[in-house]
Structure formats: structure tokens, C-alpha cells
């Protein structure tokens, strides 16, 4: 479970914005204090972009297997990561966008996804 991939849930407000952070360490030692082995990263959705802001990246990365964005008012024409289009499903009735198995997307790395 500690090495399982991550599902990132993003809940947009009425301004189509959201932010939240994650703290990851090994879950059992004090290496986060002694050796500073942890990840502290913020996820931000604004201006039709989902991106990270890193405060501390000194732990192994974890793969993101799914991103679910709730309350997304508009179905984007495309979703771009690293100059490549990501496959996504948009449920118009529920205003939920889901990206499954985005390649090369990890917690513990800086990245940006554009919803165009």
C-alpha cells in the first residue's frame, strides 16, 4: 500500500480553482526529521492548468494512476502534458473529468497539465 500509485482528486470551486498539498514519507521512521527524506508538494488548478509547486522533494516519487477533476464546467477539447495529448473522459452531466494512467506523471516531480 505504501508504494501504490496515487489517485489525485481535484474539487474545483465556483471560480474553477482549487489547491491542496501532500506530505509523503516512509510512514515509520524519523528520516523525515533526521535526513529530510520526504515530499511536500502543492497541487494547484487555476487558469485551466493543473500544476505543482514543490516545497521539498527528497523522497521516492509515486506514480499518479488517475486524476479526477470535479465541478469542471467546460469539456476541454484537449488535455496536454509534456506537449502530448492525454486521453480523458468527461461526464458532462456530473461535470467530472477523469484522466487514467497518464504516462510519466509522478508525485514528487514538478509538472503542468493544460486543459484547452
Image (tube, grey):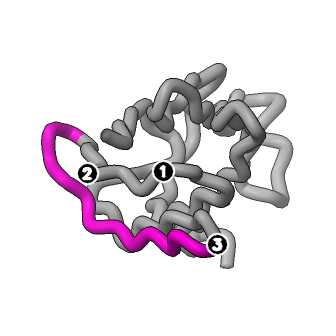
Q: Residue at x 51, y 74 (%)?
A: 91
In the rendered structure, the answer to whether residue 86 lies left or right of residue 22 reads: left
The disc placed on residue 43 is none
The disc placed on residue 74 is 1
Crowd around label 2: few <14 · some 14–19 · many ≥20 (10 Å) = few
Q: Locate residue 21, reporting x and y percent.
A: 74, 37
Q: Is residue 33 above or below residue 31?
A: above
In the rendered structure, the answer to whether residue 86 lies left or right of residue 66 reads: left
Q: Which residues are magenta?
A: 82-93
Q: Which residue is mark 2?
A: 78
Marked residue nearer the N-terminal end (1 or 3)? 1
Q: Secondary structure at mark 1?
A: loop
**Quarter of the rendering containing residue 68:** bottom right
Q: Is residue 40 above or below residue 94?
A: above
Q: Is residue 37 among what the camera can see?
A: no
Gap between marks 2 and 3 measured at Cα: 19 Å
Q: Locate residue 84, reporting x and y percent.
A: 15, 48
Amino acid at each position: 500500500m505504501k508504494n501504490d500509485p496515487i489517485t489525485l482528486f481535484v474539487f474545483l470551486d465556483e471560480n474553477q480553482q482549487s489547491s491542496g498539498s501532500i506530505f509523503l514519507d516512509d510512514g515509520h521512521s524519523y528520516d523525515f526529521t533526521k535526513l529530510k527524506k520526504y515530499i511536500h508538494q502543492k497541487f494547484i488548478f487555476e487558469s485551466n492548468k493543473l500544476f505543482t509547486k514543490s516545497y521539498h522533494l527528497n523522497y521516492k516519487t509515486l506514480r499518479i494512476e488517475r486524476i479526477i477533476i470535479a465541478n469542471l464546467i467546460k469539456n476541454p477539447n484537449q488535455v496536454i502534458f509534456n506537449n502530448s495529448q492525454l486521453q480523458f473522459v468527461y461526464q458532462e452531466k456530473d461535470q467530472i473529468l477523469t484522466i487514467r494512467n497518464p504516462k510519466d506523471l509522478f508525485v514528487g516531480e514538478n509538472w503542468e497539465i493544460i486543459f484547452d
